[in-house]
Amino acid sequence: MAESNGWLSVGKVVGVQGLQGELRVNPASDFPERFTAPGPRWLRSSKGGAPREIQLKKGRQLPGKSLFVVRFEGIDNRSAAEALVGQELLVSADDRPELAEGEFHLLDLVGLQARLTADGPAIGTVSDLISGGNDLLEVTTADGRKLLIPFVEAIVPEVQLDGGWLLLTPPPGLLEL
């Protein structure tokens, strides 16, 4: 999920599903309601420009896959759907679901210092997030190396958003990769 100019990218339209205008979306959000709950969403062309509003009518997750199939108002045939392939699906940056204790909006982690002890010096800064089967933190060290750290509780046991840091307890060898 990337944030820019008041927008959160929650997915990308990657293909057409059938003949009735449904689209396949590869999610970049851990909140399925972004793809299933009707309401306003925005699309932005891969060429950039201002997002345009579109109404999500309905959506569903494909069984056994991370892809969602969505239907937008006014997109009723395959050719209209094909014109949207490659566009980013956006929501307003202030449209953030409430989180339980111990949960984080991943974008809030970018910019945090990575430390090996709570009161120790930073070994680097979280510079990016990589979503896949598991979320990875990209930590850039002072000498410019990029470390990929799995964002799991065993390796990142403490996150102090207010303090601007997170604690790493990496297994042997992880920081040397």
Image (spheres, rainbow, N blue to C red):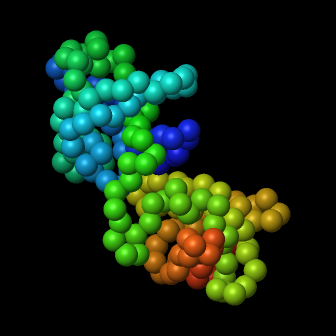
User: How far across and down, in percent of the image, does residue 167 sit?
Assistant: 60, 79
User: How far across and down, in percent of the image, does residue 4 sit?
Assistant: 55, 41
User: How far across and down, in percent of the image, does residue 176 sit?
Assistant: 70, 72
User: How far across and down, in percent of the image, does residue 36 sit?
Assistant: 22, 43
Quadrant in the picture for the C terminus: bottom right
Count of labels shown? Answer: 0
Picture quadrant where residue 68 is located: top left
Residue nearer the viewer, 148 or 172: 148
Picture quadrant where residue 120 is located: bottom right
Instruction: Please say whether residue 98 is visible from this viewpoint.
Output: yes
Query: What residue do we see at 57% from left, 73% from top?
Result: 162
Residue nearer the viewer, 17 or 177: 17
Furthest residue toward top = 79
Picture quadrant where residue 86 is located: top left
Query: What residue do we see at 41% from left, 75% from top?
Result: 102
Tell whether 129 sits left or right of 175. left
Furthest residue toward right = 143
Instruction: Please say whether residue 28 is visible from this viewpoint.
Output: no
Q: Residue 86, relative to residue 140: is it above or below?
A: above
Query: What residue do we see at 63% from left, 66% from top?
Result: 112
Query: What residue do we see at 45% from left, 27% from top?
Result: 51
Q: Residue 1, relative to residue 176: is it above or below?
A: above
